[in-house]
Amino acid sequence: MKINNWTRALLATGVVGMGAVAQAEEGPAANVLTAVSGTQISGYVSAGAVWSPDDNPFATSFTAAGDNDGFNLDVVDVTISKSLDDSEWAAGYIAEFWFGPDATGLGNNVGAGASGNDLAIKQANVQLRAPIGNGLDITMGVFDTIIGYEVANSGDNWNYTRSYGFFTEPFQHNGLLASYQLCDEAGITAGIANRADTTLTGRNTGGTSGNTSALTYLAAVNVTLPEALGPLAGSEWTFGAVDGDNALVAGAQDVTHIYAGGSMNTPITGLQLGIAWDHLNIDGAVDTDAIALYTSYEATKKLKVNTRVDYVDGGTGGIVGGGVEALGTTVTADYALWENVLTRAEVRWDHILDHGAAPSAALSGAAPATAGASDAWLFAINVLYRF
């Protein structure tokens, strides 16, 4: 039994006895220690340097566009979590916070709308397991979206900048999610949320229907190719949809996201391929398709070269500017110099194929320096430390 100096003094004077100390250790304090057992603190710090001679509107962060030349703090991520263990009635949680300019891009930053507010809740949920079949995992609170090839934490992506399709997707939801592993090769996820966008405390506004009680529905199927397929084994694919009744654009009612994509292992050592398709429809006001093709080649134990060819057809509406059609190419060199540090150099070229109804508009509503310009370059260096 570990006794501090204050407790020793009380024992020496007879104010307390050993029985009381032992009981205290088995009481609330012991319960607190049990509750925090398994809790981990992790996260990362991401910074970058960008040069965009053409004021490329396809920015490295969520919000800065065309004016991000120079050195940038992207985000500081702090995560406190306890993962589910193997027990039948396992419980865990995650609380993930973003600090820095990218926090405003999530759309739920604390005091959203206030200038310079750089704090956001990225995830905050309780996770439970019920002994139903192979085990039903339940998540309630704020969680990352279940669709998409790329994720908000850019260090988990093959490239530093994001794809066109990434910006058509929701980033997170506030609701209830259930996941069930059917077998080693397949699992399903389904859930409900308040809205199809990332406004955490907001509720549906009713859109043109006036139905303010309508919810958003999420569903996805995850497939892992079996060992019998040899070099293709372990390839992971996701097919999912998010549909909600929201007013994300003026007068709109129904928001539908459809996604299909995944990564493919290959017989060539060190080479992985990826493909992603995103479709977004907002009640006929927005109709957008984005396709991205990825390659990742591990040239040496320290060097990876990742590429992405990216296409978006803005169709109707303004998610990428009215009628804008664009093609992008990104090449990223990922070289491991220091332990726990991700160091990347990236070149990106975006070409607007069709300016559509808004010649100066591009992704996120930003424009190149010259109205109607068709080409934009971006050069970037990213350093990210994980802890």
Image: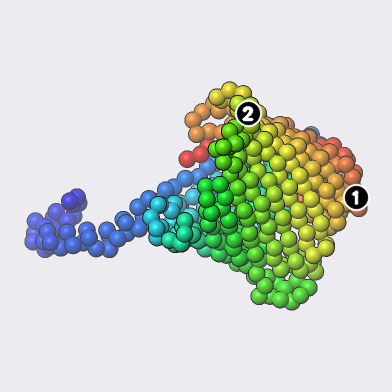
Q: Earlier in the sequence, mark 2 or mark 1?
A: 2
Nearest to the eye among marks 2 and 1: give it.
2
Using residue 185 as the reference point, say whether residue 90 is left or right of it. left
Q: Is residue 72 above or below residue 278?
A: above
Q: Residues within 10 Å of mark 1 (few under 14, many from 20)?
A: some
Question: Label 1: which residue?
Answer: 356
Residue 284 sits in quarter:
bottom right
Q: Would you identify the image quadrant in which residue 72 lies?
A: top right
- Report whether 124 appears left or right of 166: left
Residue toward you, 268 or 127: 268
Mark 2, secondary structure of its residue: loop
Q: Is residue 52 visible?
A: no
Callout 1: SS? loop
Residue visible at 65% across and 43% down in the picture: 262
User: Residue 287 placed where, x, y %?
Assistant: 81, 57
Image point 60% across, 65% down: which residue?
192
Q: Residue furthest front?
A: 228
Query: Residue 266, labelled with which disc?
Result: none
What residue type is disc 1 on?
A: Gly
Q: Disc count in the image?
A: 2
Measured from the top left, where is residue 243 in percent x and y?
A: 70, 63
Query: Which amino acid type is shown beneath numbered disc 2?
Result: Pro
Residue shown at the point (22%, 58%) measured from the top left: 25
Give above or below for 153 relative to 337. Answer: below
Q: Residue at x 57, y 41 (%)?
A: 226
For the residue pair 259 and 73, the one nearer the viewer reads as: 259
Q: Position of residue 386 (x, y in %)?
A: 51, 39
Circle 2 residue: 267
Residue 349 seen in the figure: yes
Question: Would you call the spot at circle 2 few (<14 residues within 10 Å), some (14-19), or many (20 or more)?
Answer: few
